[in-house]
Amino acid sequence: MSRPPLPPFTRETAAQKARMAEDAWNSRDPERVALAYTEDSVWRNRAEFFRGREAIRAFLTRKWAKELDYRLIKDLWAFDNNRIAVRFQYEWHDAGGRWHRSYGNEQWEFDEHGLMRRREASINDVEIAESDRRFRWTAPGPRPADVAGLGESPA
């Protein structure tokens, strides 16, 4: 299975890969997202460590059951050969209706087929007022073209 664009990445293809990941995660479909990773992909998400597509599917299912009305923006931070670093923000609310903005960085490593074989994510959450939300497009679904990335938005 191949998942273009393939390494080695250029600025354009690395940014395309980041946007494709953003769009997939905004679908909130664990099956769709998991297909972007190798069968034995290694993950660190916050303080959780796991390996493989089945673990990825289970993790994402738990995540989106807790992080409701999830909306994400990822921006390319750096790239080299088969590695990409992104920064991201996402907004969500918990079962009690409290809104949060999560800030993070990810480091990705890809195999020759364009599948991610390693993902390391560091994430911090901040509770926000509903009126402070910035990500208000209809979800699930991709961020509309007229909604700016993080480079154009405040911290």
Image (cartoon, rainbow, N blue to C red):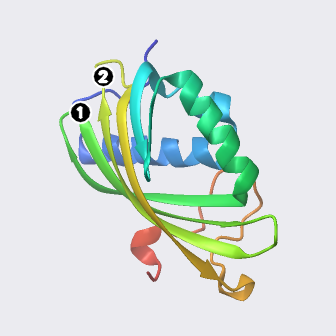
Q: Which residue lies furthest to the right in this view?
A: 96
Q: What element carries label 2?
A: loop
Q: In this view, does 127 lie to the left or right of 64?
A: left
Q: Is residue 57 left or right of residue 95?
A: left
Viewer-nearest residue: 16 or 59: 59
Q: Which of marks 2 and 1 is nearer the N terminus?
A: 1
Q: In the picture shown, does residue 149 fall above or below 65?
A: below
Answer with the quarter of the image where residue 83 lies: top left
In the picture, the disc for residue 111 is 2
Is residue 74 in view from this perspective? yes
Q: Residue furthest left?
A: 80
Q: Residue furthest top?
A: 1
Question: What's the distance in space between the residues labelled 2 and 1, CA to CA?
Answer: 7 Å
Q: Picture coordinates of residue 53 (x, y %)?
A: 53, 23
Amino acid type at mark 2: Asp
Q: Picture coordinates of residue 7 (x, y %)?
A: 26, 29
Report which residue position mark 1 lands on. Answer: 82
In the picture, the disc for residue 142 is none
Viewer-nearest residue: 15 or 55: 55
Q: In the picture shown, does residue 6 fall above or below 113?
A: below
Q: Picture coordinates of residue 100 (x, y %)?
A: 63, 73
Q: Is residue 70 left or right of residue 3?
A: right
Q: In the picture shown, does residue 126 fall above or below 141?
A: below
Q: In this view, does 104 lie to the left or right of 90?
A: left
**Pointers 2 and 1 in contact (C-beta within 8 Å):** yes
Residue visible at 43% across and 51% down in the picture: 47
Q: What element carries label 1?
A: loop
Mark 1 residue crowding within 10 angstroms, few (<14) / some (14–19) / many (20+): some
Amino acid type at mark 1: Asn
